[in-house]
Image (spheres, rainbow, N blue to C red):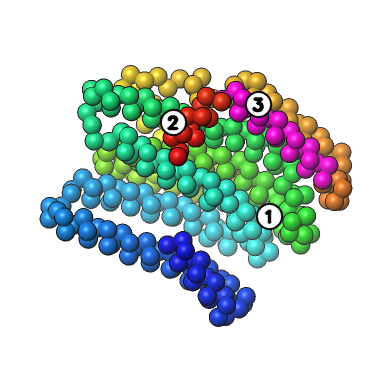
Amino acid sequence: AVIFKAIVTVLVLMWAGDIAALLAFGCGQLAYASVLVAGYRWQSQVVADRSKSRDEKTTMLAWALSKQSLVKQFLTEGDKLIVSRVSPIEDQGGYAVALNYGSLIARIVFQPVEESSRLYFSQALNGREQDDKSAKADTARAWQVLSSLITAHLHLALLLVTIAPPLVPPLLHHVLGARWSATSAPVVLQAYCYFIPALGLNGSTEAFMQAVASPDQLARVSRLMTVFSAIYIAACYVFVQTMGLKERGLIYANIVNMALRIMLCSRFIKRYFEKRKITTASKIWRPGTIVILAFAASGALTRYTVAKVDVYGLRGFLVAASAGALLASACLALSAYCERDRLKLLLTRQR
């Protein structure tokens, strides 16, 4: 599907030129979806030919996940509709640029991790009795993997929240030019630094819940997500209209929504493992105090450097970016050393 998307996009661009860039993107997405639908249809037909009986459990699970997808699609597209209502056209462009750059990590890193995690948890935790010895061992290993994923997301959050925000506006200025720096793109991308960790953490915890929850549990989750949608709309009104934060307010409203979903998944995870006599204490997955202090100090030093040099000049930007990169590397090295055993386990399971 990815190959077909790339081929169709290139062919449309070659045929119609750069003026049809949006059309090429749309045609590529349509080709991607069409190949996926055709592949799933072919595979489901193969399974149906092998067994004439209908799997009610699978059907109910698919329906529950489909309802969740509809709610998520509404939340994904809702902010774009709000931006088109409250923002001038140049700020709409800035929001789109920030959204595309900010979502690169989600598309490149989070999506493969989320999909592989969902597959691993589904295979490891479904289909066996709880009192089976091998099932208990698989459950313990699954918690090790999940807690390692949570730890990795929290370390990434420390990096993005402390060091990245002060470097975003000058980076955007030097990459895209002063034209885009004058739009809402810098402040939106700064806010995105706080949203990305919530997005990744929600993806991994939700992948676990979807992998092991029953259809009835997923149906209850879908109903709660409808409530979260109402809270999201209320948060949008507060941040955008009452507080006047405009595009940045939409990111904060999304953070509120993600926080609610993370709390829901965390509650499910805690109950799931404690029912199986596995402790989920926060000391198992949270970063160490030394690591948190190191990131906090690095963030303060980065902000001090940005304030003292002309970051919109090339030399000043290189000084600030080098300082930020050096501090980030030192913090990540400290994190890797403190979490070396957990990191080794996570890399092994993700393969």
Which range is magenta?
318-339
**Residue 28 colored in magenta in the image:** no
Image position of 145 with respect to 279: above or below:
below
Instruction: State which mark lies toward you, 2 or 1.
Output: 2
Residue at (52% x, 70% y) in the render: 9
Image position of 337 with respect to 185: above or below:
above
Instruction: Give the labeled residue for mark 1.
Output: 185
Instruction: Give the labeled residue for mark 3.
Output: 334
| Quarter of image, res 165 | top right
Left or right position of 63 against 85: left
Residue type of the residue flagged with mark 1: Ala
Residue at (86% x, 45% y) in the render: 316
Instruction: Give the labeled residue for mark 2.
Output: 145
> Tag 2's secondary structure?
helix
Spatial CA span between label 2 and label 3: 21 Å
Q: Furthest-left residue in view?
A: 52
